[in-house]
Amino acid sequence: MNYMSAKEAAELWGISQRRVAVLCSEQRIPNVEMIGNMWLIPKNAEKPIDGRSVRYMKEKRMKPFVKWAGGKGQLLDAIKRQYPKGIGDTIRKYAEPFVGGGAVLFDILNKYELDEVYISDTNAELINTYRVLRDNADCLISQLAQYQDEYIPLSDDFRKEYYYQKRKRFNDLKRQDVMDAEIASLFIFLNRTCFNGLYRVNSKGEYNVPIGSYKAPLICDMDNLRQVSEALSNVTIVCGDYRKSDDFVDSNTFVYFDPPYRPLNATSSFTAYTENAFDDKAQAELAEYIQQLSERDAYVVASNSDPKNTDPDDDFFDELYSKMKIMRIFASRMINSNASSRGKISELLICSY
């Protein structure tokens, strides 16, 4: 019988040599032999069906557990078309330094088995919620189930009283820098019952979004929360600036950046997810950082607003990312103080490869 090496099989099948070795060790390839520390594979062997893809098709897909301003659910198909070839095989790491609601994160976790995943955000309460869900899901789910049982039967007036009591409790804990399961459960409760699923703070750092008008909000999505908890079990979760990802990112990493968008006009800005602004200087610093990652051969995709929606002569991002591929895609504006202005606008996808 004629044999080929794991390297030759990897090149033939378009996957990594490491993945071939895993398939051999799992006895997924018939008639393989190991001589010393080298796998020998029959030359007529066929590439095994990827069990990860089969599992993905059969299992219910997890989804973001919070709504988030600027969430990428409606743009996900366009972003997925920019995933680098080799993700899950030769590209074994993923980083998302502005994770927010994590629409792209959960699509990646649904589809691919990676060696390392890194997420971060500057919103301390959001990151605490990710960590609690990863490390203490039972406690979080129990508290959310209680909120749901208490809140749903109430009349509108009593719902308002209940909501504002929970909002006050959340702000009291926030003021004390408490980061535990209680404030995480309050974070999800408020997100599920507030107006438009917003996270907004005032000048004092207090969460100030009013109650929403949902008839039967799903406060405790138990099945999804458990799936998310399991998927996060080996994810590195960091509270801090996007630059903290620097030591994590290398040439085998896919990085997605979804920073606070540059406002299209003076009234469209909605970047108060943390107490820190993200102005043009910050946008330029991020672009410089993305260029640095690109120069070390990382695979980088970034999203942002398209200033040409309101000013065709505004080349801010075209100049910042002149060395990269810039695509304009269309999406519905989901958050705006003027409901009549919600509609299709173009947004930017910036790609380093």
Image (cartoon, helix red, strand yellow):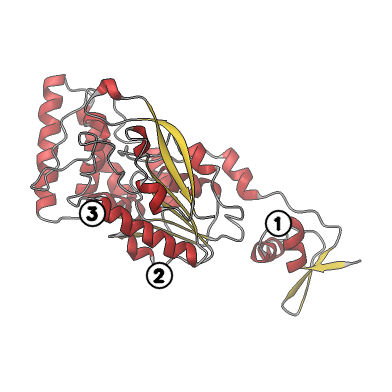
Q: Position of residue 281 (x, y in %)?
A: 26, 55
For marks 3 and 2, the one nearer the N-term is: 3
From the image, tell me which residue sits under label 1. 14
> Dot 3, how many residues are within 10 Å of its Cα: few (below 14), some (14-19), or many (20+)?
some
Residue where numbered disc 2 is placed: 247
Spot occupied by residue 100 in the image (x, y as percentages of width and height): 33, 46
- Which residue is drawn at the image coordinates 29% and 27% (left, top)? 217
Instruction: Determine which residue is flagged by label 3.
Output: 124
Residue 247 x/y as whole percent: 40, 70
Identity of the residue drawn at 19% across and 48% down: 183
**Drawn side of residue 184 relative to residue 296, left or right:** left
Q: Secondary structure at mark 3?
A: helix
Amino acid type at mark 2: Asp
Q: Counting residues from the N terminus, which is met first, the one under dot 3 or under dot 1?
A: 1
Verify CB contact (< 8 Å) between mark 1 and mark 2: no
Q: Secondary structure at mark 1?
A: loop
Residue in view at x 15 percent, y 20 percent: 156
Query: Which residue type carries mark 1?
Result: Gly
